[in-house]
Image: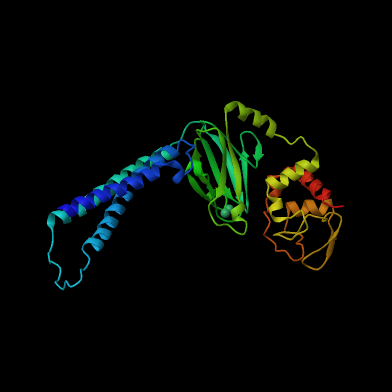
Amino acid sequence: MVHFIIVGLLTVASTWYLVTFVFTPENLLPAPASAQAIPIDRLFVIQWFFMAFFLSLIVVFIVYSAVVFRKKKGDTSAGKHFEGNTPLEIAWTLLPLLIVFYAAYEGGVTLEEVERQELEPLVVNVIASQWKWRFEYPEEGIVSEELILLDGKQAVLNLQSTDVIHSFWVPEFRVKQDVLPGGDAFAKQLRITPNQIGDFTIRCAELCGTLHYSMVAEVEVMSKNEYNLWVTEAGECTKSDVECGQELASTYACTACHSIDGSAVVGPTWLDLYGNSVTLADGSTVTADEEYLVESIIKPNVKIHEGFAPDVMIQTFGDDLTEQQITQIVEYIKSLSE
Ligand code: CUA
């Protein structure tokens, strides 16, 4: 009997330690910042409690038995033989069964809560590409490098990839979604209702190539007033063509593949490209003038630069960018030549 009391007390102490560990927030996850995080954290704590209890029970039993009932010197007798224990067998069948049903119930309730749709959400199209995030606000006509969300307002993110599988993850929001290539048929939705004003970081949570680690973007959760201000300012580029082109090259991830320092990345460098002669894959040469640059942006496969592969570059810039935006990017490329 005394053994059971000791094992019981040790199990309670161990469970208590593990449970309080998870309630000390800095030990595990960053502070939650969305309405979806509340039910998710609740479910996490419930599951953690059961895991802490059963882990403690098993480990304490094994360690206690191994130490206290170890073979003593000079003792050659065999252990006492016993067979079957009906009440115990019923208990360890029924109890886990009930826990599984309870876990299924709590899981269902949480999922329903996390996927709940609110009226008139903020719609944002999220486009992932190696190794960059782009955020489009179709209702406002804005394309941004930073994700801007409204405090207390549900956002619907329509996620698509232009190349490989990426994954949208903001730890403070708790929810995560893989982003798939393949067009509208493979578009995924994610609903987030931020409830904290502040800055957070999006991380790509799917290994997606060489620069996967650097595929991060900022999220800023704003009040309604700040948001309105941002919408008026972000709508149009009012700077010089070269500066607007530089911003576009960053927003559309051009410079992820085309370096501006002369190094060859995925595509040819932009440094000293304009005005110089380019050798093509078929051996012929062309001069990189405005016409050539525009054509290479809109129809990248027509003239392939020697040493680089076709079909690597996104083929839809002609539809995604306005004529003015393409001119601005070309102006920026021109500014990189002496
Ligand atoms: Cu995109 Cu990892």
Q: Which residue is drawn at 34% across and 46% down?
A: 17
Q: In this view, does 59 lie above or below 173?
A: below
Q: Quadrant of residue 109?
A: top left
Q: Between 208 and 330, which is closer to the camera in this rendering?
A: 208
Q: Which residue is drawn at 25% across and 58% down?
A: 64
Q: Which residue is drawn at 35% across and 48% down?
A: 18
Q: Is residue 290 above or below residue 308?
A: above
Left or right of 275? Residue 88 is left
Whole-percent x and y of residue 327?
Answer: 79, 45
Q: Which residue is drawn at 28% across and 45% down?
A: 102
Q: Between 64 and 228, which is closer to the camera in this rendering?
A: 64
Left or right of 153? Residue 274 is right
Whole-percent x and y of residue 270?
Answer: 78, 54
Q: Between 65 and 265, which is closer to the camera in this rendering?
A: 65
Q: In which quarter of the image is residue 136?
A: top right
Question: Would residue 324 be visible to someone looking at this image?
Answer: no
Return the residue found at the far top: 225
Left or right of 148? Residue 113 is left
Whole-percent x and y of residue 115?
Answer: 43, 40
